[in-house]
Image (tube, helix red, strand yellow):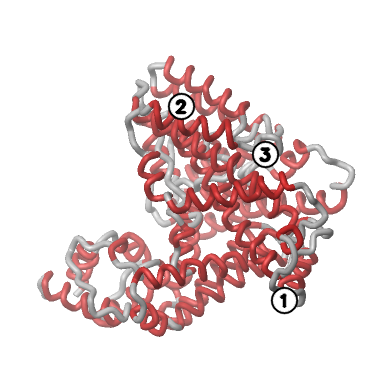
Amino acid sequence: MVPGTFAYFGFLFIVILFYYAINKVEFKQWLLLISSLFFLYFFGITSILFAVSLSLVNFFFGKYAIKGGYTFRKLAIINVINIGVLISLRLTSKYHFETISFFIKDEKFEFLISTLGLGFYTMQNIAYQIDLYKKRYPADTDLLKFTLGNIFFARISSGPILNLNSFNQQLTTLPIRFTEENFTIGLQRCLIGVIKKYLIVERLAVYVDNCFDSTIYTPCGLGVVFGTVLFTIQLYFDFSGYMDIAVGSARFFGIKLPENFNMPLRSESIADWWRKWHITLMNWFTQYVYYPLVYQIRKYQKTSVIVGIAATFLISSLWHGFGFTYLIWGGLHFLYLAYSTLNKKGLQLLKSKFPPGLYSFLFIPITILMVSFANLFFRSTNMVHALRLLTLLFKNKFWPSGTLHSWLGMNVITEDSILFTLWVGVFLSLLYLIFETKLIKALSYPKFRIGWFVFLIVMLVTLGVFDSASRFIYMNF
Amino acid sequence: MSSNENILADLQSIFRVEFSDQTIILNESTTADEIKMWDSITHMGLMFSIEQHYNISFSLDEIISFQSIGDLVNTIKVKI
């Protein structure tokens, strides 16, 4: 049951009905917990076992560790368990896929060994233990709320990463009555998430999947650039669409989840990009990796910052997956940020020489190209695929010749309808990005407007591509 | 003990040097959101410059928890 499908929204609708039929906050918490366990069941019984057992271990470890003083040794033990489980499951998953994936195509099996959202709630639990060790918060005394913070169905697939303490505070003040504001914002966010997925992501996949996964297609260099930029746009719509559904679903219950995106495709630099892209993940890395490390060695000034950036992106690469492609992705972002840190004054001077509008006009596309180049490795299944694209990019003819089909390398497929699907997707994504500021404002409007609702539904029904949608890209992490 | 105004003036000079921007004007309600280059990467360098200027030391939690220039001024005031 993937967020964004009919089954998911049917499930959500039933939970909302029960939720507002109940008057006591504690029973509402129980309902959300049972619903979350039910949701996890669709991804295999091991998902429930891992999620619940990790919650229990972290809850009771934290509770008893503070008695007699939370020492560094205790912190090391619990985090070796947390990280050990994550690493061993990722390795198991990789091993199984490499050896038996030709024989087993059942999607449930994939979930069975990868477990849903493990990377996300592992990070929450590590943060919880560090905060206890640092005496930033008292130990949680409510197992129900603690477990719900880890497995709440609206956000378990791919985050956002929560601060368990502040999430638990929201759980104690759950609304008793259904409000127009919660209903309207919840509905609008869910709808826009589905629109992003079925109107844009699935259309862009027509070219992105062929460009990255097929060995038959041979686009020219510009075709590869087009494919990688398109993937960056696709990833944004896919992940932010998932986030819209997560935030919207939680809002129906009066819960406000933190946002993960702030219009990243308008970034003027890579540093700007990381302030706007996957915000809760970067906040986690900043608070629990970058700051503690740089603080210890801060007397080395710029060197300490470079070391901090290197460590952050090394761990971020490993968190996304074990493989050279992720390491190169992280390495490229490290190089981008290290260069801008070491040449801060020069870049500032350069910026001052441009009128603000012109600077944005030039540097937004440059930033997207730099991110897309790193994403060439992020999206490639393995190094063989990445090297194939690099060869097409640098050794093949860069500029196109012949028909549009041929420069996109799609000469194998001659159906115009496929190209039409792609161009409609490109057009819709550009339209969304141009009006993004206004759209975000409209989506957070708290009063229900029937015209706006009908417009979103008509867009979805008339332009949606429903036949191939499967799951969200970030559910792999 | 320095007054808030004196600390604010010192901080403004440090910020201008750190961010190579002579137009920065600080007041106690200024936050990181209002200064475009003030992010997690530049934050540590900034804190180190302030520590050196006043010959003081911030704890990690202090560095992480500063929400505004006012918080920074109050912490400096206690330490000098």
Chain where mark 3 sits: A
How far apart are labels 2 and 3 at the CA level?
32 Å
User: Quick one: label 1 or label 3, which is nearer the N terminus?
Assistant: 1
User: Quick one: label 2 or label 1, which is nearer the N terminus?
Assistant: 2
Image side of residue A408 versus residue A232, left or right: right
Residues tagged by mark 2 and mark 1 found on one chain of the structure? yes
Label 2 belongs to which residue?
A29
Residues tagged by mark 2 and mark 3 found on one chain of the structure? yes
Image side of residue A458 versus residue A318, left or right: left
Amino acid type of the residue that numbered disc 2 sits on in the rendered structure: Gln
Q: Nearer the viewer, mark 1 or mark 3?
A: 1
The secondary element bearing badge 1 is classed as helix
What x and y, as percent, mark residue A458? 52, 30
Query: Is residue A329 in view from this perspective?
Result: yes
Q: Write the residue at 60% across / 64% down.
A: A372
Viewer-closest of A288 and A389: A389
Look at the numbered discs 2 and 3 and tell me whether their residues touch, using CB distance below 8 Å. Answer: no
Quadrant showing the N terminus of chain A: top right
Q: Which numbered dot is residue A469? A: 3
The secondary element bearing badge 2 is classed as helix
Look at the numbered discs 1 and 3 and tell me whether their residues touch, using CB distance below 8 Å. Answer: no
Decide: few, some or many residues near mark 3? Use Cα within 10 Å; few <14, some 14-19, many ≥20.
some
What x and y, as percent, mark residue A236? 55, 52
Decide: few, some or many residues near mark 1? Use Cα within 10 Å; few <14, some 14-19, many ≥20.
few
Label 1 belongs to which residue?
A394
Q: Which numbered dot is residue A449? A: none
Q: Is residue A268 above or below residue A395?
A: above
What x and y, as percent, mark residue A380? 72, 60
Viewer-closest of A152 and A253: A253
Amino acid type of the residue that numbered disc 3 sits on in the rendered structure: Ala
The residue sitting at the top extreme is A21
Q: Nearer the viewer, mark 2 or mark 3?
A: 3
